[in-house]
Image: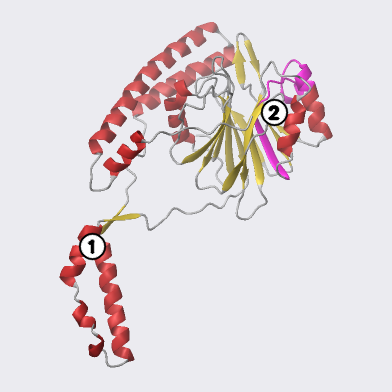
């Protein structure tokens, strides 16, 4: 597991199509639990629904009549205080951002950025400047499609040279991993990295061979303590019909008739008795809300993921097509097992629905309501 023991854990990944990888992605998030997950090339349309439990999702889908492509997305833990800024029309990049508002720190802008290979090699910096101005502290993280020796690439592309000069002029720090992040046919490059503005905390950054795409997920871990809001300790459900019956059976208002109260001590005693009776009856008629929908990945699927990742690592180390073929086969087998596991999980949830805890009503309401994603202001 890649994690920051006392800091802010941000992950970036070019998915090259998110819908077909969402089950694998949920397992990945269950394993690594990043605080913020930035995703590029989602290939989502506004009509698509995408959610991850315990995370808030913000999207900037590419609106096109052609095949689904591009798009960026941000997942942030619901326990982290933040707000989302609307994305204005961009000239050369695709991006969206949130403003993290820690309790004991100035706001921090976190940006998920994707620069398509066909974008103008000069205009993209104008778009980057907009996001760098959204906060005095800023992290722009994602797929820049730019190569330069400054971040361990063999070739200095035009975009890479322009980006390098841009970072130097604005005094931006470029955070990149030691190993490549994108693997093509007989090639490997580092094009997924971060631009950091005025957020000078110690950090580690690492590219890991997990998830199935031509890009590796990249973890950027800051040694930066975040205070989070605690979960609600009073999350309970009450059977109010049972509460009313028990209260009527065990409680009589005649005991509190004013003529029976002669002094302030009697009044205090009656108030205490009344309060204790109501609280006890409420406690007897209530029970904690149990989150029964937490996902646990079976061991055999974890083993399949581990086997696939080992083959992927072999291919990335050697660029041998033989290992690429084996990795593809392992991925096909994994997808079959994930589909079976997903169906089994859904069937188990349906069988567990009942009327006593409102789970049946909540499921019916979720399936009945139509949800539409509001498009960005492009």
Q: Nearer the viewer, residue 335 or 66?
A: 66
Q: Is residue 4 above or below residue 94?
A: below
Residue neighbourhood size for the residue with mark 2, other residues' Cα within 10 Å, grouped as few (<14), some (14–19), many (≥20): some
Q: Secondary structure at mark 1?
A: helix
Specify start and end residues of the magenta stretch as a single range.
Answer: 136-161
- Quadrant location of residue 351? top left
> Which residue is at the far left?
249
Residue under label 2: 90
Q: Is residue 37 above or below residue 224?
A: above
Q: Nearer the viewer, residue 48 or 172?
A: 48
| Residue at the spot 15% in from the left edge and 69% down from the top edge | 249
Q: Secondary structure at mark 2?
A: loop
Can residue 110 be seen here? The reply is yes
Residue 106, percent from left and from top: 68, 51
Q: Quadrant of the C terminus?
A: top right
Q: Nearer the viewer, residue 127 or 327?
A: 127
| Residue at the spot 23% in from the left edge and 84% down from the top edge | 257
| Residue at the spot 24% in from the left edge and 82% down from the top edge | 256
- Quadrant location of residue 339? top left
């Amino acid at each position: 597991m890649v994690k920051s023991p006392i800091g802010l854990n941000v992950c970036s990944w070019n998915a090259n199509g998110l819908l077909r990888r969402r089950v694998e992605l949920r397992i990945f998030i269950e394993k690594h639990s990043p605080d913020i997950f930035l995703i590029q090339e989602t290939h989502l349309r506004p009509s698509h629904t995408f959610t991850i439990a315990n995370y808030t999702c913000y999207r900037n889908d590419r609106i096109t009549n052609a095949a689904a492509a591009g798009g960026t997305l941000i997942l942030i833990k619901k326990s982290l205080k933040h707000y989302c800024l609307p994305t204005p029309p961009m000239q050369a990049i695709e991006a969206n951002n949130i403003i993290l508002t820690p309790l004991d720190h100035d706001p921090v802008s976190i940006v998920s950025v994707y620069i398509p290979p066909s974008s103008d090699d000069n205009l993209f910096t104008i778009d980057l400047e907009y996001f760098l101005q959204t906060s005095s502290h800023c992290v722009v993280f994602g797929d820049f499609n730019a190569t330069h020796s400054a971040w361990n690439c063999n070739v200095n592309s035009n975009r890479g040279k322009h980006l390098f000069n841009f970072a130097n002029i604005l005094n931006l720090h470029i955070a990149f991993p030691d190993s490549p992040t994108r693997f093509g046919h007989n090639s490997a490059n580092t094009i997924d990295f971060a631009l950091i503005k005025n957020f000078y905390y110690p950090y580690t950054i690492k590219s890991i061979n997990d998830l199935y795409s031509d890009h590796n997920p990249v973890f950027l871990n800051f040694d930066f303590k975040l205070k989070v809001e605690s979960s609600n300790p009073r999350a309970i459900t009450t059977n109010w019909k049972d509460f009313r019956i028990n209260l009527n059976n065990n409680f009589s208002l005649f005991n509190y008739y004013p003529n029976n109260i002669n002094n302030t001590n009697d009044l205090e005693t009656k108030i205490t008795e009344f309060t204790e009776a109501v609280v006890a009856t409420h406690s007897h008629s209530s029970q904690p809300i149990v989150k029964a929908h937490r996902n646990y990945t079976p061991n055999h699927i974890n083993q399949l993921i581990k086997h696939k990742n080992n083959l992927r690592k072999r291919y990335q180390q050697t660029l041998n097509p033989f290992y690429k073929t084996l990795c593809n086969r392992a991925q096909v087998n994994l997808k079959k097992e994930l589909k079976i596991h997903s169906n089994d999980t859904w069937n188990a949830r349906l069988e567990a629905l009942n009327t006593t805890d409102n789970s049946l009503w909540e499921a019916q309401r979720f399936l009945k309501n139509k949800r539409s994603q509001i498009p960005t202001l492009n």
